[in-house]
Image (cartoon, rainbow, N blue to C red):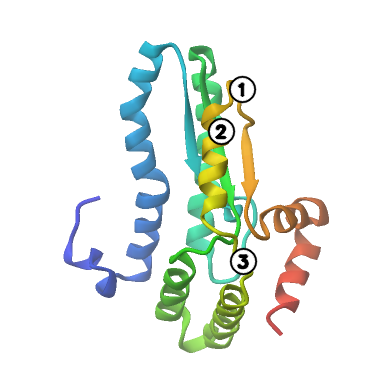
Amino acid sequence: MLATDSMVPWKMSPLDAARQQFEVNLFGLACVTRQVIPHMRKAGGGTIINTSSMGGKMYMPLGAWYHASKHALEGWSDSLRLDLKPFNIHVVVLEPGVIDTDWGGIMMDNMKKYSGSGLYAKVAEKIARATSQMYVKGGASKPSVIADTIARIVADKKPSTRYRVGALAKPLVWMRVFLGDRLFDKIIMLQLK
């Protein structure tokens, strides 16, 4: 995608912002991966670590494009893993939960920008308040949990396919998978009342 005036963050339309989500979370990663694969083949193997999110396995209100980009990354990584297996190249998906980084603030700013007024204003405010409380009350994991996990993946000769780490990652994905769509939807929506 070419950078245009509409790609300046404060001038982006909602659809441009959605495209940027895919550029950052999928296509940019794919471009870098494409550059390293020939070197890994030549070396006889390697490990590619794609950072997704617990959001690649579940969803929340007002996060459609973010979750869509992470779901796409999960599917792309799964296919890539099969494509590269004959070359002894492992493809690992890292699925962080809530990590104490600037991402929470960025997410809230974007949510308020695109959904903070109009029909979704009340929902946006509730999500922003809950997210802010989680970070303030220390509900997020330290970034070192990601660094430690990456070090473990790199050191492992046969890494697992997925590593779900950080606050809420395992329980929320478990709820999504084992409770089914309707019950998961109900639980999420009850949190917004």
Q: Which mark is residue 153?
A: 2
Q: Which mark is residue 60?
A: 3
Dot 1 or dot 3: first in sequence order is 3
Residue 101's x, y, as percent?
Answer: 47, 63
Q: Residues within 10 Å of mark 3 (few under 14, many from 20)?
A: few
Q: Name the amino acid, label 1.
A: Lys
Q: Residues within 10 Å of mark 2 (few under 14, many from 20)?
A: many
Question: Quick one: SS at disc 2?
Answer: helix
| The quadrant where residue 19 appears | bottom left
1 vs 3, front mark: 1
Up/down of 193 relative to 82, above or below:
below
Residue 94's x, y, as percent?
Answer: 56, 43
In 3D space, how far apart are the residues under numbered discs 2 and 1 (Cα atoms)?
Answer: 8 Å
Q: Residue at x 77, y 71 (%)?
A: 186
In 3D space, how far apart are the residues under numbered discs 3 and 2 (Cα atoms)?
Answer: 28 Å
Quarter of the picture holding the C terminus: bottom right
Q: Is residue 52 visible?
A: no
